[in-house]
Image (cartoon, grey):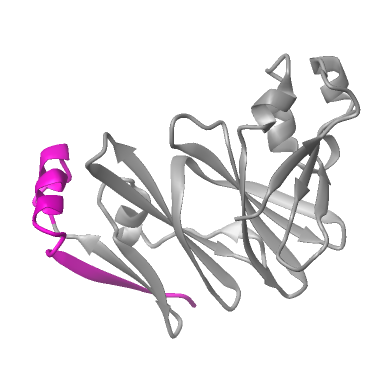
Amino acid sequence: MAILLLTACNKTIDNTELNQGKGLILDFEQPSKESIFIDIDNQVPILKSYLAQFDEPEIEMSRMQSTYLISYKQRDYFLLSYSCGTKICHQLLLEHYQGKIKSFEVSEASFLQDSKHSNNYLAFLFGRNEGKEVIRNQVVIVDLQNFRKMTLPEHFGILESFEYPIPSIEWKDRHLKATIAVLEDPSYDSIKEWNKNNKESTQELLWKIQ
């Protein structure tokens, strides 16, 4: 887990100052590396638009969470969780390379459960909870070379749907393997019963990355 710090030119910053880019900086700390400083106004338009709605954006920034993911081909990758409720957040993937930042939203209203890296691909397993007993999952795969979210084949759409529990993901050769619950229907009661049965009924889905 990286540490996310907020630095600002002033203790309080109104929307005009935010739009002019006078104060909000993200400070990402990495293992055994120098911190990365990101100017929200000039480098992360999604966050700029989001924070513009707040009278005191620095307070909202203090609720954000940063996760250091990997360094690959001289690029550093972070997941920034923002617009957080009790547990779920929007998830923004950031790439840092030679002082430049790319970003896009990879998931909405979720929390990160796992991430797996293989060559040019990074797979995420996100969760969305219903109470304390039921969690539904989503799998997202990012093509790091082109920095884009990959479109899953139609028959694998279930992986993105946040309908079923997906206990695990892993890379096997050039395949992404996802273990998914076998249920007659993805209702709350069915998932709750599946949990009570020690999550024994599962199947594996394999997607070959071309």
Where residue 7 appears, as percent x and y from the top left, is 83, 36
In this view, 68 is above or below 209: above
Q: Is residue 40 left or right of residue 80?
A: right
Task: Answer with the quarter of the image where residue 17 lies.
Answer: top right
In this view, 98 is above or below 190: below
Residue at image coords 80%, 16%: 15
Residue at image coords 17%, 65%: 202
Task: Answer with the quarter of the image where residue 73 lies.
Answer: bottom right
> Is residue 207 highlighted in magenta?
yes
Task: Answer with the quarter of the image where residue 176 lies.
Answer: bottom left
Q: Farthest residue toward the bottom?
A: 173
In this view, 47 is above or below 142: above
Classify the position of the N terminus by image quarter.
bottom right
Can residue 40 be seen here? The reply is no
Can residue 18 be seen here? The reply is yes
Where residue 132 appears, as percent x and y from the top left, is 26, 38
Residue at image coords 74%, 31%: 48
Question: Who is closer to the viewer here, 83 or 3?
Answer: 3
* Magenta region: 183-210
Q: Is residue 19 left or right of residue 63?
A: right
Where residue 55 appears, as percent x and y from the top left, is 72, 14
